[in-house]
Image (cartoon, rainbow, N blue to C red):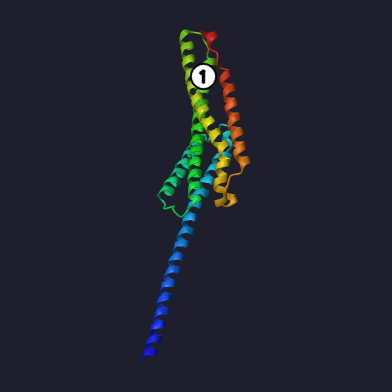
Amino acid sequence: MNMISGTRAKVLLTAMIAVAAGSVFGYWGAEKYEQRELREDIMWLVRDASLRLRTALTHDSIAAISDNDEALLRSFYEHAVAVDGHLDKLRNMDVSHAGNLAIAAHDYLTATREILLRRASSQRYRLKLSDDLQSLRSHMRADNRTGVWITQAVRAKERVEEVYRDFRSASNALGALLESFPALQAKIAPHVDAVTLIDDSVVSEARMRIAAVARDTTRELDRYANLDTYR
């Protein structure tokens, strides 16, 4: 009787241990799964942001005005808004188990959003500057040297110079962000696939094109810089 009871007790104890172990391993497995899912969600945000940025940096319109630039301008802002949404998603996640990935992803998404915004701003001011310059050119060709003409020329030039300052500011900010971008990418690199990253040469070429556009724009303005001869 006692032997049977002792055996049953051992069996019961073994069963209880097995259930407890199963619960522990089950919980551990579920936790690992959730952590893996969290990392995948964060990496998807980074991959999508990287794709949007690569698209914005490699577009030919950096170097030339085209008929499609208004639509392109909208797409730049749409990319920036989408990445801003990614940042909101990241902030709303419980990233306590994501470690350095969460920190690197936050910095990467923030920088990407700012680059896209400056890319859009630079494009917007550039389009406005192109229109204002065309108006100034037309006015200069219609020179009749009257007082009204001179006043209108000065006002047109002032409008051009104001937009040009905004363009230069946005372009300089964009250039500075792109200059620091490779170092920022190095922080996220250990956590993502290499295909996610934007090659440094792409970033460098974009910087050079942006700088070239700024130089060309400055030379174009210099042609209309001196209106004193008409005063």
Q: Is residue 137 above or below residue 37?
A: above
Please provide percent x and percent y for residue 38.
46, 56
Residue at 50 percent across and 50 percent down: it is 100
- Bin the neighbour count of mark 1 within 10 Å (Cα to Cα): few under 14, some 14-19, many 20 and up: many
If the image is split into quadrants, where does the N terminus sit?
bottom left
Residue at 41 percent across and 53 percent down: it is 94
Please provide percent x and percent y for residue 21.
44, 72
Nearest the viewer among 56 and 192 is 192
Q: Is residue 225 above or below residue 177?
A: above
Please provide percent x and percent y for residue 87.
44, 45
Nearest the viewer among 40 and 31 is 31
- What secondary structure is found at the residue carrying circle 1? helix
Q: Is residue 5 visible?
A: yes
Look at label 1 and name its amino acid.
Answer: Leu
Residue at 46 percent across and 14 percent down: it is 152
Residue extending furthest bottom? 1
Residue extending furthest right? 201
For residue 4, side relative to residue 197 (left or right): left
Count of labels in the image? 1
Q: Is residue 66 visible?
A: no
For residue 202, side relative to residue 35 (left or right): right
Nearest the viewer among 21 and 135 is 21
State the residue position of label 1: 136
Residue at 47 percent across and 20 percent down: it is 159
Residue extending furthest front? 2
Q: Is residue 174 above or below residue 13?
A: above
